[in-house]
Image (cartoon, rainbow, N blue to C red):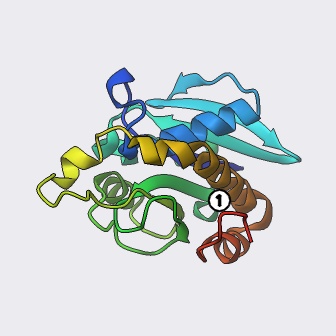
Amino acid sequence: MYLIVGLGNPGHRYQLTRHNIGFIVVDALLLHFDSRPTEQFKSVVAKVKDGDLDVILAKPQTYMNLSGEAVQALVAYYKVPLENLLVIHDDIDQPFGQLRFQKNRGPGGHNGIRDIHEKLGTPDYARLKIGIGRPTNPHVPIEDFVLQNFSPDEEKSLSELIQQAGDAALTFVESGFQRAQNEYNSPRSKDGS
């Protein structure tokens, strides 16, 4: 059993904000698998099959800062080994569009990840960090920036980024962390080479 969790905030107000990139990727995966989610353990959840593999797709509805409550409950109920857990989230320390698999690292100022670390009692699980960059205006606070919608320039390449992040998540499920890290952690050119 695998668990893919996309982080974000529930509600229309946050739907297309930078902080919700994890939700957006999980929504794309739900479409890919033509799955109808239900509510369970403070999350929107769908159980899908990727070939012979069982995968739970989840979007915690606890708001970002309490993401660990939902993740801990899902891991416990579905008896998901931590090596089969992938959390997808935004990262301001990477340029927009850059993907990076990581595990056993600190939260880097991300409150959702901090809460998951605390509730699971370990940072030893896989994360797919999606770069959203930092504000170009140094007077814009980070907490405001992450809750803004993507810029028109970012929106032009957003669907390609979401597709790539979804593919990366499925590579993790099908081929493991190391393969996914090797394939997606180096910056790639626009043509995918």
Residue at x 32% of width, y 25% of height: 13
Residue at x 67% of width, y 58% of height: 168
Q: Name the residue under label 1.
A: 84
Whether residue 45 sits left or right of residue 193 in the image: it is left
Residue nearest the viewer, comparing 43 with 20: 20
Q: Is residue 112 above or below residue 152?
A: below
Whether residue 79 sits left or right of residue 89 in the image: it is right
Whether residue 135 sits left or right of residue 24 in the image: it is left
Residue 31 in view, yes or no:
yes
Picture coordinates of residue 108, whole percent (x, y): 31, 68
For disc 1, the neighbor class at 10 Å (few under 14, some 14 to 19, many from 20) is: some
> Circle 1 sits in a helix, a strand or a loop, which is it?
helix
Residue at x 49% of width, y 42% of height: 155
- Residue reaching furthest to the left: 139
- The quadrant in which the C terminus is found is bottom right
Picture coordinates of residue 5, whole percent (x, y): 54, 46
Picture coordinates of residue 137, whole percent (x, y): 19, 57
Q: Is residue 23 above or below residue 103?
A: above
Quarter-wise, where is residue 36 in the image?
top right
